[in-house]
DNA sequence: GCACAACTTTGAATCGTTTCATTGTTACGA
DNA sequence: TCGTAACAATGAAACGATTCAAAGTTGTGC
């Protein structure tokens, strides 16, 4: 089969006008039952499939939305993507997914590609500081919603998660379960998420008389970095051991847990409580199931699409920023010492 | 900005014919330097962006390739996707990504969507048994390459990984490091991958005089399932402990490792060697870094695109199946007892 | 000064769909 | 039987880029 059947072929085959075939596809009510049947039969017999390019050309815009994430491999984004796809499907749109892999070049490529495709709008979790690139989009009038990053509301809508609140939640939980001497483990505070989570934790600690928060800086945010911190804690000995540890993400927490449980020096949660952040799949299947802070990724994805739809449909764009509060997930790693 | 500039607007603005603008974009050599500059200036001033729909309509096909995977969250597919994107970029094509989530309905939606988009071809990791759906694609003449699934070569090209060889590799490695009494841990052998890996392991064991392979069936392929198996091994006691354990995936292996290291009943690799499959990110950061079998995901993605390109470019389609052999990754969990 | 080749530029035709003003058909009440 | 309203069907125009035959321009050698 060289060329697929066009609407014209269908029209000929069914002995009707092309407009009628189009109506059957788009406004079935306008067409009589008899004609409709003939046309549908022809469509079936010829294996006709709409040519979306022609449709788009005529319509002036596509029925797709572009979504550019920093890393599809990251469960956080995977979940956002899925939610966005489902939400878009409700509006009859499809999502074109791009993975920038934290690379500004790849990001730029996708932005160009999506603009050539005349996407209705763009959801983007931008790489680094990107005001220029995004300003260009704004000038061109491409509705854009920033994901997982707060935006100047005069410029863009955005959806984000309140990391300060998440940090507060984690520290508050440790305090609530009776721990007073707390430690925060995180990478460089130049990472906004880390800084915000720390700030929230500090806020909670300040509220609690007699509580303290020690900051332990890790080399990165990986399991291995967490293990180093754990080993350091073991060397410092029991007297210097915090009662509760809040790690800036689950990988760090799992690393800390590994070193403590491997050596059997300290028990979790009896000697020290441990809480992470992100609630990755591995949190629940850790040696000691890990308490964590879960980010409302489904809500993020869904809301991002909703904000975008708002912008697409309204004429003069009003931007909104929606900030979600994360959720505490309690597991064994922070069980009360008494109940331990 | 209501409507973006068209090639006609650019032509007017630069006082040239539309054909000339098109030539500047597609065949710059055909245009004189002076004209080219004028046109490029106009393009810049008007913020012109090519309308891909119009281009596609004229060309009769898009410059995109559809890729439907079972689960973008799965690192295996994530890696395949990335490789496919890079390979497609070399051919000047982009990849439209669809995540079926093991759901035949979603898969069908993506197939339809991609056909309407007139993708050049389709890479698909199909859900379940799908001969009918795929046969339809074949009838329509949509070049299709199956990913991670062998295909009847008279019908489709395909790329896959030899799980039998992977199983052989894992068992062979345990034997090579001096282990004789081996165990295989896996979910139901109704899962093809599990069955193939087991078969390969059995082949290796048969080759080795005096070696044995015990099959332990787990309830699923998760960390928790692995932990149950580990606990069972502990209960059985030291005499019944295999010298080497091959788990059908890394999650199972990590579970087994957890239960053994947590209780300190048996040491890895001194008392028992452990090897997994997939080489997930967590394998390297396990308490005892886990040996594993790595699947050549980059090669899979790249080759899939290459086979597809072949089919697209050749007139009468010749199908090929490419099977890759996985790779052994040795880490501490299978170190020789002597060197342990 | 002219013929001819080489290089530029032109603009109408085309791709497949949707839109919509127009025309055709039917049914019904007067 | 006629007028009219409601409903169906028609088909040309439009969307924006690419193509390509044709026309226009320049340069070269004799």
Image: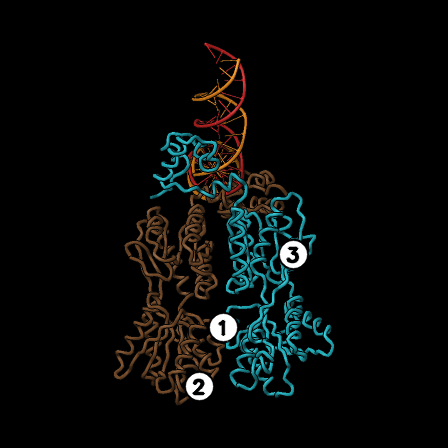
Chain colours: A brown, B cyan, C red, D orange
Which corner quadrant holds the C terminus of chain B?
bottom right
Asked whether the viewer can see residue B97, the reply is yes
Instruction: From the viewer's perspective, tell me whether residue D22 is left or right of residue A309.
Output: right
Q: Chain letter for mark 1, please.
A: B
**Dot 3: chain letter:** B
Instruction: Check if mark 1 and mark 3 are on a common chain.
Output: yes
CB within 8 Å, label 2 to label 3:
no
Q: Is residue B177 above or below residue B5?
A: below
Q: Residue A249: where, in percent of width, then height?
A: 40, 71
- In the foreground, B60 or B195: B195
* SS category of the residue bearing label 3: strand
Give the alpha-carbon distance from disc 1 to disc 3, as whole Å: 32 Å
- Figure check: B11 above or below B63: above
Q: Which mark is residue B285?
A: 1
Q: Which residue is mark 2?
A: A265
Residue farthest toward the front in the current orientation of the protein: B339
Residue count near mark 3 (Cα–Cα under 10 Å), binned few <14, some 14–19, many ≥20:
some
Could you tell me how many numbered marks the image carries? 3
Rendering quarter of residue B327: bottom right
Q: Which residue is mark 3?
A: B322
Left or right: where B184 falls relative to C16? right
Marks 1/2 same chain: no
Query: Where residue A256 sits: x, y (%)?
Result: 43, 78
Which residue is rendered at x = 36% and y = 58% of the image?
A128
Quick check: B224 left or right of A87?
A: right
x%, y% of residue C5? 54, 22
Label 1 close to label 2 by CB (< 8 Å):
no
Q: Quadrant of the N terminus of chain B?
A: top left
Which label sits in the foreground, 1 or 3?
1
Can you say whether A212 is above or below A151 in the image? below
């Amino acid at each position: 089969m060289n060329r697929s059947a066009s609407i014209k072929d269908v029209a000929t085959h069914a002995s009707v006008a092309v407009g009628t075939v189009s109506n059957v596809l788009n406004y079935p009510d306008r067409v009589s039952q008899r004609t409709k049947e003939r046309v549908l039969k022809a469509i079936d017999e010829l294996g006709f499939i709409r040519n979306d390019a022609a449709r788009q050309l005529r319509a002036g815009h596509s029925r797709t939305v572009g979504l550019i994430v920093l890393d599809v491999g990251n469960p956080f984004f995977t979940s956002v993507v899925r939610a966005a796809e489902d939400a878009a499907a409700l509006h009859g749109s499809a999502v074109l997914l791009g993975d920038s892999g934290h690379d500004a070049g790849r990001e730029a490529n996708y932005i160009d590609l999506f603009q050539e495709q005349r996407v209705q709008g763009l959801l983007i979790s931008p790489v680094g500081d990107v005001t220029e690139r995004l300003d260009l989009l704004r000038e061109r009038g491409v509705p854009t919603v920033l994901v997982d990053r707060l935006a100047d509301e005069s410029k863009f809508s955005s959806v984000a998660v309140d990391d300060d609140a998440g940090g507060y939640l984690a520290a508050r939980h440790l305090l609530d379960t009776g721990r007073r001497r707390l430690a925060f483990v995180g990478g460089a505070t130049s990472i906004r998420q880390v800084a915000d989570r720390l700030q929230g934790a500090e806020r909670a600690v300040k509220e609690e008389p007699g509580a303290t928060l020690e900051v332990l800086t890790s080399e990165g945010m990986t399991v291995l970095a967490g293990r180093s911190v754990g080993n350091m804690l073991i060397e410092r000995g029991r007297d210097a051991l915090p009662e509760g540890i809040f790690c800036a993400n689950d990988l760090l927490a799992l690393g800390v847990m590994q070193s403590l449980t491997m050596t059997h020096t300290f028990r979790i949660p009896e000697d020290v409580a441990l809480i992470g952040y992100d609630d990755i799949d591995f949190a629940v299947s850790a040696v000691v199931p890990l308490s964590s802070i879960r980010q409302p990724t489904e809500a993020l994805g869904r809301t991002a699409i909703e904000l975008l739809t708002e912008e697409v449909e309204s004429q003069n764009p009003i931007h909104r920023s929606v900030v979600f509060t994360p959720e505490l997930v309690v597991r064994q790693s922070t069980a009360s010492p008494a109940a331990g």
